[in-house]
Image (cartoon, rainbow, N blue to C red):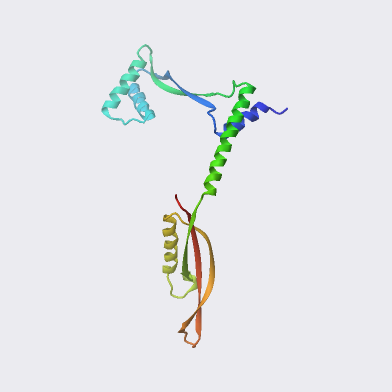
Amino acid sequence: MVDVNQIMFDMIRKSGSVATSSVNEIEEIVDTGLEKTEDNIQKVAMEYLDEKGYARSVQNMDMAKKTVTESSAYFDTVRVRKTRRMVDDMLQEAEPEELEKLMDICLLDNLMKVNEKLDKLSNRQMEYAVEVVDEIRMDSEKTGGSLVEFVSFQTLLNRYAAQGFRVLGFTTREVGNHGKLMMAGFSSTQKQTIVVFEREVTV
């Protein structure tokens, strides 16, 4: 049989619209099982500082040793105060009527979030930039060449990215270099890449 309450529990938790658990911290004295000697007190004090994230300075060590000594005062073993986190599930004791109300709250909250996103999308304004880049060839494609052209193109992309642009698309075209004569006496063509960038305008 389907556990409807469990399904509602999972949906409410996944929505993130309401708090479903509470965290309580309880301080308790923990028995380390170590014999109460100066060396063991020193050891437990250092572990106490490390656990708390405090530096092992002389002042902190003295305070930690004092805390450990006081916690172990009436015992034969070394004891230390530790904080234990307890997480209580607030939904486990909820009645079906309460779960239904929580589901309604989650539904309304998510509808409001969707409306906010739609409003943002409908009012979104974009701006565009276009760059024309000459043919990019790698070392293997040209004799005695270098990566200068490739690095230059990469630099161009990173420059636009730093300004919040992203590549929307690109296309290639061939243009004739009619003003340049090759060794055989014919004009050449050159490939160019047209890159279109876009970014959202912050109003």
Percent x, y of residue 24 = 47, 22
The quarter of the displayed image where residue 2 is located? top right
- From this view, report whether residue 161 is shown above or below residue 95: below
Tell me: 61 left or right of 35.
Answer: left
Residue at the extreme left: 58
- Residue 171 shows up from this direction: yes
Number of disc labels: 0
Q: Is residue 202 above or below residue 27?
A: below
Residue 94 lies, in percent from the top left, at 60, 22
Please identify the residue farthest to the bottom as the structure is shown: 185
Residue at figure coordinates x 38%, y 13% from the top left = 76
Depth check, front residue: 5 or 62: 5
The percent position of residue 169, horizontal first and vertical second, equals: 53, 61
**Percent of width and height locating residue 126:** 49, 55
Q: Quadrant of residue 16?
A: top right
Quadrant the N terminus occupies? top right
What residue lies at 41% left-to-right and 59% top-to-bottom?
A: 159
Q: Where 178 falls versus 159 (above or below)?
A: below
Residue 37 at least partly seen:
no
Question: Measuring 63% from the left and 29% from the top, which residue is drawn there?
Answer: 8
Closer to the camera, 128 or 196?
Answer: 128
Q: Is residue 146 left or right of residue 19?
A: left
Q: Residue furthest right?
A: 1
